Image (tube, grey):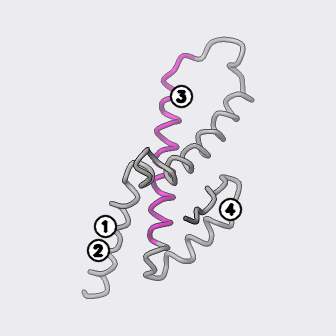
Amino acid sequence: MTTTPTPSIFDGSQLAAIKRQSRSNDPAALKAAAQQFEALFLQMVLKSMREATPKDGLFDNDQTRLYESLLDQQMGQVLARRGGPDGKGGLGLAGRIGRQWSRERASAWRG
């Protein structure tokens, strides 16, 4: 079983490649774009959870907030890619989004 590495939040070339590939009707490109969308959604959830927690104490400073922001971004990537114990990845949003995009593209080509 070959696994692909989890993308780094610092790798802008991967996002550019997904954008370039998504212009075609390639199912792998749609899957990658849907996974990236799910990663962004998970990042927003993690950020909201952090904002809801009390911020008092020694570690409440700009450096800690920056680190937590970077951590949330990378965790979103990891969770979207690896997901839960079933091994299917993420929350299942990427699969649903990818199927929806595929249907929309198919109807656009017909219509």
C-alpha span from label 4 to label 1: 26 Å
> Circle 2 — which element?
helix
Comes first in the chain, label 3 or label 2: 3
Q: Quadrant of residue 54?
A: top right
Q: Is residue 77 left or right of residue 85?
A: right
Badge 4 density bin: few <14, some 14–19, many ≥20, Cα 10 Å = few
Residue at 35% over, 70% down: 101
Left or right: 91 in relation to 65: left
Q: How far across and down, in percent of the image, does residue 47 sit? A: 53, 35
In the image, is residue 33 part of the stretch drawn in magenta?
yes
Do the numbered discs 2 and 1 sit on residues whose CB atoms are within 8 Å? yes
Which one is in front, 96 or 5?
Answer: 5
Question: If the image is split into quadrants, where does the N terminus sit?
Answer: bottom right
Type of residue at label 1? Gln
The tag earlier along the polypeptide, 4 or 1, is 4
Residue linked to disc 4? 12
> Which residue was labeled with disc 3?
50
Amino acid under disc 3: Arg
Magenta range = 30-54
Q: Which residue is mark 1?
A: 100
Q: Position of residue 40 (x, y in %)?
A: 51, 50
Instruction: First in sequence, mark 4 or 2: give its number.
Output: 4
